[in-house]
Amino acid sequence: MNDCGLCERQLEHGYLCGGCTRATTQRLDRMPKLWTALAAFLAPGAGGSPQYGRTRPAEAPLPAREDVLSLRAAGGIAGVLEDWRAAMQADRGWGVPVVPADVGRRVAVAARALAINMDWIAAEWPEAGRFALEVRALEGDVLSIVDPEDPDDRRHRRGTRIGHCVAELPEGDVCGAVLRSYPGEATLTCRWCATEYQPKDYLLLKQLQPAAPA
């Protein structure tokens, strides 16, 4: 039995759960659009706010934002996806991928090649967790520029791991997703199945935790 490499939900087999497989596929599908969206933020200060230190009016501006340039350059989004595609193809015994000349095309081709192999990646590839984490982080890097999170919104912080959700799903399986406690929240809410655990449930939740593997 493994834990999902992204959400840490317990799995009978494979390396990514169904939800994280779908989420990673969707992130891959969005990568070409995100790469294109970054072009609007190349100018210094584009999309930024002096309040958060994104622009420095007292200093001479750079010709373009370095963070955006890095993500749009050959070694940015394209390079990350191509490295994972090459690793995946090597482990499948396939040949070295053909790399297009245009960077935007490279992003689209690499993302598509990975997306259409997600079933194998999730079920068979030990690197699936690291891969999914890096794709999520890459998307986060882009979204921090094109759609930055409100600095006062901390609902997506990681929190403290409490254990596994023990709720029974409609199909009869136990959810098994990782439960996390967040500051200021007395109720534990499973981000996977939405089951809520009140303080009065904590002792029973602890008693029902799956035994650690021998």
Image (cartoon, rainbow, N blue to C red):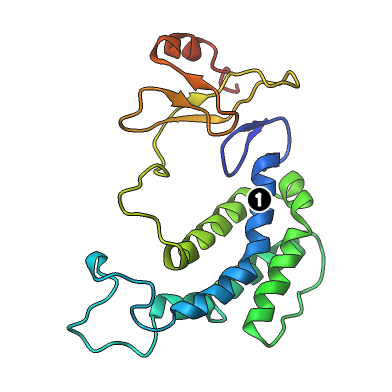
Split into 4 quadrants, where in the image is the C terminus? top right
Would you say residue 68 is visible in this rendering?
yes
Residue at the image point whose x is 73% and y is 59% from the top = 115
Q: Amino acid at mark 1?
A: Ala
Helix, strand or loop for disc 1:
helix
Of residues 93 and 30, which is closer to you in this image?
A: 30
Q: Position of residue 73 (x, y in %)?
A: 53, 81
Residue 51, quarter of picture: bottom left
* Residue lying farthest to the left in this orientation: 58
Image side of residue 39 versus residue 88, left or right: left
* Residue lying farthest to the right in this orientation: 94
Of residues 9 and 62, which is closer to you in this image?
A: 62
- Relative vertical location of residue 40 with respect to residue 184 in this rendering, above or below: below
Split into 4 quadrants, where in the image is the N terminus? top right
Q: Position of residue 153 (x, y in %)?
A: 35, 47
Residue at the image point whose x is 54% and y is 73% from the top = 37
Q: Residues within 10 Å of mark 1 (few under 14, many from 20)?
A: many
Q: Position of residue 55 (x, y in %)?
A: 27, 76
- Relative vertical location of residue 117 with respect to residue 123 in this rendering, above or below: below
Residue 41, quarter of picture: bottom left
Image side of residue 211 versus residue 147, left or right: right
Residue at the image point whose x is 57% and y is 36% from the top = 8
Would you say residue 126 is visible in this rendering?
no
Count of labels shown?
1
Residue at the image point whose x is 53% and y is 61% from the top = 139
Of residues 34 and 25, which is closer to you in this image?
A: 34
Q: Position of residue 83 (x, y in %)?
A: 63, 69
Q: Mark 1 = which residue?
A: 128
